[in-house]
């Protein structure tokens, strides 16, 4: 597993958080939506993500010690918020059993969403605080939040298509906008790396050369994915087929993107300034 | 796909920085168990060790590395957990600590290496007489008992002696087994110029020292008085571990300007901020002649005094027709040779430049600078002498010093500055005594020159002297110690020779090249597993080391092997090893001497009491010396404290220069001999090639000239590049090549100039094939601007790893490229070797530190 | 709080890597793990090439990103400024490796933890010198209070081959060859 664990952890967490966020938004528009299936799926994804994240550690048994430096470490904060998110999702799933009333559920929804967003924020800051120019950029934050919006959105669509009746078009427009913004910013991000330090330039070179093909595929998949979501609204009889195709495209595209993110992470150091 | 982040993170842009290796399967800390075996230390055992008492013991660092330093081992229960170097006194440039290098600091990884030979073993398909001899080097190994091993060796000795006689025994090296073989009736030995090249036996004939046993240069503190220091073909930063380069640095700080003449821009040049004069290997003599021409033609005793006529008149013979020794033809003088008076070829800087590649301007400039500088030091390493046909070059180097009078006074010196004696000439100030063991005579007088011995074994003929070729039929090779198959020239022939004879046996620590091609391999102890001993190096120190650990596995001392074998052979085993190890050590202690404080004569070093003698259980008399035995053992070293103007300085030729008649040199004429009949006769007597009595230039076999198929038209031949063998910091000759820490630190590439690489489409780090007339080897190319184009640097001493399918070596073993070429005094001419380099189209090499270790059992 | 640091005199370094090996020995490091590493650089054009070596370990930065980012607090700054590590706390997350501009923290595969130079704190506490300092055959590595080193020696923290020193404020002073200086 090793380094794949970071690809899987970040993708799964962002997907889960995004799905929860979307669900909360949708719920605020129509109280009776409960998105139970979605919540259970989020809980499962978050659990898998957290377990997979352990595989990145050399000493997984000490994972809890990662919480010891919330004071200054974004990694500690990431774990804290991710853990809290998991707990809150758990409570959300148990909502009825715990006999939460409507406003408590609304409050829980928003609190959980905020905690989830803080988790994505911490995750972004974690990479942005590194010595790796390809990560040490606001594009990282954009990438992570776009993934949250897009994969979260598609997840909600997959789990709760029926409940979303009437909202899919709006949702798809937001997803498409997020992807387009990311795509629009990306060339200037690469150009910025190309004009940067030796490590940044090396990352840019890797993006353009070794990972160039994969990068093109990634954008085709992601843009195609949101395209399929939009298209699904014009092909109502095949809506779910389109949504599943979109899911496949978006997940593959974002995994490719995240893989590239890690693979071009050249650290600055002695001789590679 | 595992490791993609790691790969990106560790991306290295610059050269010479190495990639971080992930997992390496090297056992870390190891220890001796009750069984005498090694095992990896578990955390629990490590904790247990940590709680035990620890002791720093002075450890031998006994290698032929060109330096000598204090090495100490922190020993806990027979395990070395850490090392350190000299901290016996405060450090200062005058009285420096004797600090060891990367090799010595990783010594525990050698002694306790997982690839140490553990048991005696024989080749699986060996049978009396050899069995399938072609399988040597590729057969499997079978563990055998010591008894069986010694039995096999003894029986083969007897069988071969009966069949062929003692002249069939070839002894590769190792003083201990030579005793047994001497008692058995003798053996064919071997000889050669080894590291010295043409500096080995010539200098004593023309009045200079060879630079190891004796020195023609002043001591290091006087060196600070030199204004100009010329270092010709030496890179102590790489080839003389310990303090030598530090001594040069002090001279630099004192204001000296440095000039380094070398095919490559070295670390020595770099830190001394030297002017670098790139030169082709094997052409130094030509440059020296060009410089001498400049001096002769530009000298004006009044207006432009470049030549020290007073010195030449008083101390030198053979420079010009007016200063010839009795009976010599006056036309045979150096001046007329240089001016071309009789041969019509003036040895102008232009003439020299065409050969040596040094700019004419640079040749003239350096000659003038040496000529007018009041106090200059003219130094050379042995490397320029490790060239074929170069017997006259050292004499010409002396001539340059003599012409400019850079000899015999403070700050003025000319001679060899390398190995232990780098930048620090003079007799030893402290030395150990003899061990008291009488020698054993070798009744066989045949001895094979290194540059001919493999050929001699293969062809059955060798050169014993002038017009004296003798038959020889070697059928048994005993490697008692020296890495001759690895480090003597012509390894391809050497392997062939090993596959020809009926029996090969080797004592060693690892499966070295010697052992790899043997029938029986006997595991020997290292110095760390022995009683103790002494090490001298630079003149100011004597190191007293003692046992670190008990013999590992079934390893035995070489002397034990010699003795037990003698017993099996029915010889007088006690004659082989007549004195106990303890007594031998004691004798050396008791006989140790130190220079008197007034600088005149030597006195006892060690105070020994009768209780010391009783405690040691040895025979001896109490004596009074400078240091008690206890303190000497604790410190592990005696170092003579030095400071400027003390009584221990040394000015070479000082008395000779003052009054040559009263203090003659040990030459035929008592003077420095630019005309040297003795040298000419010495060379002739060896029976290989001949020289003139004056230093004329002889284009070397396999030198620059040989890279051309048509020298006149300057058409390059099949092997257009010259090879040099830099001493490389991963190894001391071949020793330490297997140490993973050092493999990681020093990847052992082949150095190729950017220009030559570009012409061949070779990129940095790519695997290249290096081919000579004699063999092929692979290495990763290291592209550099620090090497003169036309020259390839293949580091010396890598353990050959020959692919039996293709015959191509993968380790970059230097002697795969060299041939058996005897010239002059029997020179091993490694730095005259020519090759071609090309991109390798087969599988790329993996870094050496990832290669599997040679672990047999 | 005081700040200890290293001094490195590049002008006399021969790249012999004795410091690197002495460090490996002191810390008993496997192949692949280097707490102190000698990097070599060269350039120019024959016959005027240049080269230099840089021996570097942890620089015990005044603003250590590794300490800031370490999620467990395993990495911490001692009162004498040494960036030390409580190995028991380390979980091998490698975030320090991503944080250090000098490649100082090293992942130890067999232990599943990171290790790094602690300036031989155990030896310092016993009144001895760091292993690399005592090992250097050219006497180019020194250590001490950074302020005192600065008074005693000329030097810089910024080289052409190093990330800018203001990222972490390394406690190192390098007597650089002109060709190695920033902007050279």
Image (cartoon, coloured by chain):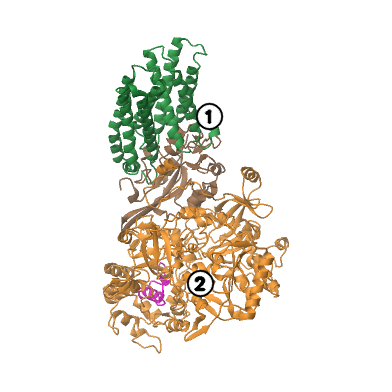
**Which dot, 1 or 2, sits closer to the camera?**
2
A145 falls in the magenta region: no
Q: Chain B shown in which color?
A: orange
Residue at the disc numbered 2: B496
Q: Name the image quarter holding residue B152.
A: bottom right
User: Please, what secondary structure does the residue beneath circle 1 have?
Assistant: helix
Residue at far front of view: A237
Q: Which chain is brown?
A: C
Q: Examine the rendering and report whether any part of residue B311 can be seen.
A: yes
CA gap between label 1 and label 2 equals 65 Å
**What's the magenta region?**
B384-412
- Depth check, front residue: B109 or C131: B109
> As rendered, which of B578 and B820 lies closer to the eye?
B820
**Chain ID, mark 2:** B
Quadrant location, the N terminus of chain B: top left
The front one of B35 and B829 is B35
Quadrant where the C terminus of chain B sits is bottom right
Helix, strand or loop at disc 2?
helix
Classify residue B52 as left or right of residue A64.
Answer: right
Rendered green, the chain in question is A
Crowd around label 1: few <14 · some 14–19 · many ≥20 (10 Å): some
Q: Position of residue C99 (x, y in %)?
A: 42, 37
Subunit that carries the residue with mark 1: A
Taking the magenta stretch, the answer to whether it contains residue B394 is: yes
Image spot of residue A72 (x, y percent): 45, 29
């Amino acid at each position: 597993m090793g380094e794949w664990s970071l690809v899987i952890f970040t993708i799964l967490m962002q997907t889960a958080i995004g799905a929860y966020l979307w669900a909360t938004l949708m719920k605020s528009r129509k109280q009776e939506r409960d998105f139970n299936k979605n919540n259970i799926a989020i809980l499962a994804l978050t659990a898998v993500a957290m377990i997979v994240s352990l595989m990145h550690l050399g000493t997984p048994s000490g994972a809890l010690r990662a919480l010891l430096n919330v004071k200054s470490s974004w990694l500690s904060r990431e774990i804290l918020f991710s853990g809290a998110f998991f707990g809150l999702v758990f409570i959300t799933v148990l909502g009825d059993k715990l006999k939460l009333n409507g406003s408590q559920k609304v409050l829980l929804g928003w609190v959980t969403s905020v905690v989830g967003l803080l988790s994505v924020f911490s995750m972004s800051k974690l990479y942005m605080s590194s010595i790796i120019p390809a990560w040490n950029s606001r594009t990282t934050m954009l990438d992570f939040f776009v993934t949250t919006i897009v994969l979260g959105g598609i997840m909600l669509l997959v789990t709760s298509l029926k409940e979303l009746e009437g909202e899919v078009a709006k949702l798809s427009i937001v997803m498409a906008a997020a992807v387009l913004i990311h795509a629009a910013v990306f060339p200037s991000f690469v150009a910025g790396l190309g004009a940067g330090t030796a490590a940044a330039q090396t990352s840019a070179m890797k993006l353009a050369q070794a990972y160039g093909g994969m990068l093109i595929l990634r954008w085709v998949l992601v843009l195609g994915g949101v395209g399929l979501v939009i298209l699904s609204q014009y092909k109502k009889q095949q809506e779910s087929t389109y949504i599943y195709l979109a899911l496949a495209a978006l997940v593959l595209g974002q995994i490719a993107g995240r893989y590239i993110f890690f693979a071009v992470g050249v650290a600055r150091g002695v001789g590679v300034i | 796909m595992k490791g993609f982040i790691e790969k990106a993170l560790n991306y290295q842009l610059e050269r010479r920085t190495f990639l971080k290796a992930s997992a390496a399967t090297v056992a870390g800390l190891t220890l001796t168990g009750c069984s005498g075996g090694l095992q990896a230390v578990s955390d629990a055992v490590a904790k247990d060790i940590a709680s035990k008492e620890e002791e720093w013991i002075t450890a031998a660092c006994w290698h032929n590395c060109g330096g000598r330093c204090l090495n100490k081992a922190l020993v806990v229960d027979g395990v070395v957990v850490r090392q350190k170097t000299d901290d016996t006194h405060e450090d200062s440039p005058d009285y420096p600590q004797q600090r060891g290098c990367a090799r010595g600091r990783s010594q525990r990884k050698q002694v306790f290496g997982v690839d140490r030979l553990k048991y005696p073993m024989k080749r699986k398909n060996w049978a009396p007489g050899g069995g399938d001899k072609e399988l040597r080097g590729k057969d499997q190994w079978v563990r055998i008992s010591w008894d069986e091993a010694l039995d096999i060796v003894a029986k083969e000795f007897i069988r071969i002696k009966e069949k062929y006689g003692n002249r069939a025994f070839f002894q590769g090296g190792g003083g201990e087994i030579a005793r047994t073989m001497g008692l058995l009736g003798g053996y064919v030995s071997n000889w050669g110029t080894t590291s010295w090249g043409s500096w080995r036996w010539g200098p004593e004939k023309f009045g200079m020292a060879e630079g190891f046993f004796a020195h023609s240069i002043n001591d290091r503190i006087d060196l600070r008085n030199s204004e100009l220091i010329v270092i010709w073909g030496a890179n102590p930063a790489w080839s003389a571990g310990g303090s030598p380069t530090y001594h040069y640095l002090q001279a630099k700080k004192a204001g000296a300007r440095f000039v380094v003449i070398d095919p490559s821009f070295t670390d020595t040049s770099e830190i001394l901020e030297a002017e670098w004069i790139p030169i082709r290997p094997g052409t130094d003599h030509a440059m020296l002649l060009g410089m001498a021409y400049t001096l002769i033609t530009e000298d004006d005793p009044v207006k432009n005094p470049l030549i020290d006529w007073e010195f030449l008149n008083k101390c030198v013979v053979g420079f010009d027709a007016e200063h010839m020794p009795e009976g010599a033809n006056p036309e045979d003088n150096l001046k007329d040779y240089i001016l071309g008076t009789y041969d019509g070829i003036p040895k102008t800087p232009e003439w020299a430049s065409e050969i040596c590649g040094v700019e004419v301007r640079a040749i003239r400039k350096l000659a003038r600078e040496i000529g007018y500088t009041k106090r200059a030091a003219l130094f050379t390493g042995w490397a320029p002498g490790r060239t074929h046909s170069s017997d006259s070059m050292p004499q010409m180097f002396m001539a340059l010093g003599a012409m400019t009078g850079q000899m015999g006074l403070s700050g003025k010196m000319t001679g060899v500055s390398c190995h232990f004696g780098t930048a620090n000439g003079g007799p030893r100030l402290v030395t150990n005594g003899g061990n008291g063991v009488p020698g054993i005579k070798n009744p066989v007088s045949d001895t094979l020159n290194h540059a001919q011995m493999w050929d001699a074994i293969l062809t059955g003929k060798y050169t014993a002297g002038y017009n004296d070729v003798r038959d020889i039929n070697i059928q048994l090779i005993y490697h008692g110690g020296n890495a001759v198959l690895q480090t003597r020239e012509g390894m391809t022939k050497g392997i062939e020779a090993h596959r020809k004879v009926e029996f090969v046996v080797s004592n060693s620590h690892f499966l070295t090249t010697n052992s790899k091609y043997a029938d029986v391999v006997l595991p020997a102890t290292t110095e760390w597993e022995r009683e103790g001993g002494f090490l001298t190096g630079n003149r100011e120190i004597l190191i007293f080391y003692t046992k670190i650990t008990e013999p590992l596995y079934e390893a035995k001392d070489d002397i034990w092997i010699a003795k037990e074998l003698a017993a099996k052979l029915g010889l007088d085993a006690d004659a082989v090893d007549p004195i106990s190890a303890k007594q031998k050590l004691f004798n050396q202690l008791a006989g140790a001497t130190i220079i008197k404080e007034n600088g005149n004569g030597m006195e006892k070093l060690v105070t020994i009491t009768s209780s010391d003698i009783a405690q040691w259980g040895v025979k001896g008399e109490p004596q009074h010396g400078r240091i008690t035995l206890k303190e000497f053992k604790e410190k592990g070293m005696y170092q003579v404290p030095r400071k400027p103007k003390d009584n221990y300085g040394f000015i070479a030729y000082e008395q000779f220069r003052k009054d040559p008649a009263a203090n003659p040199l040990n030459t035929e004429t008592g003077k420095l001999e630019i005309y040297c009949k003795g040298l000419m006769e010495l060379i002739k007597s060896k029976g290989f090639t001949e020289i003139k009595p004056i230093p004329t230039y002889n284009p070397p076999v396999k030198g620059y000239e040989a890279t051309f198929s048509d020298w006149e038209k300057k058409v390059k031949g099949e092997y257009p590049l010259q090879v040099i063998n830099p001493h490389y910091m991963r190894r001391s000759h071949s020793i330490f090549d297997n140490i993973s820490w050092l493999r990681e630190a020093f990847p052992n590439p082949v150095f190729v100039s950017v220009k030559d690489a570009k012409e061949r489409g070779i990129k940095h780090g790519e695997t290249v094939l290096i081919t000579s007339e004699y063999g092929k080897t692979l290495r990763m190319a290291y592209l550099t601007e620090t090497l003169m184009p036309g020259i390839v640097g293949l580091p010396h001493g890598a353990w050959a790893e020959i692919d039996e399918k293709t015959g191509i070596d993968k380790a970059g073993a230097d002697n795969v490229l060299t041939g058996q070429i005897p010239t002059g005094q029997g020179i091993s001419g490694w730095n005259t070797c020519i090759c071609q380099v090309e991109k390798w189209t087969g599988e790329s090499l993996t870094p050496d530190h990832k290669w599997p270790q040679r672990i047999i059992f | 709080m005081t700040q200890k640091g290293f001094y490195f005199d590049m002008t006399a370094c021969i790249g012999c890597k004795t410091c690197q090996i002495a460090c490996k020995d002191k810390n008993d490091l496997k192949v692949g793990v280097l707490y102190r590493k000698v990097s070599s650089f060269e350039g120019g054009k024959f016959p005027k090439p240049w080269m230099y070596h840089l021996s570097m370990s942890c620089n015990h930065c005044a603003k250590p990103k590794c300490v800031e980012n370490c999620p467990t607090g395993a990495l911490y700054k001692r009162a004498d400024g040494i960036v030390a590590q409580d190995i028991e706390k380390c979980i091998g997350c490698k975030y320090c490796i991503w944080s250090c501009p000098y490649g100082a923290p090293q992942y130890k595969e067999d232990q599943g933890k990171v290790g790094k130079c602690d300036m031989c704190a155990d030896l310092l506490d016993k009144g001895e010198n760091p292993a690399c300092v005592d090992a250097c055959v050219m006497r180019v590595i020194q250590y001490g209070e950074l302020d005192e080193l600065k008074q005693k020696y000329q030097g810089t923290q910024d080289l052409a081959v190093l990330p800018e020193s203001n990222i972490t404020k390394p406690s190192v002073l390098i007597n650089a060859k002109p060709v190695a200086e920033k902007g050279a």
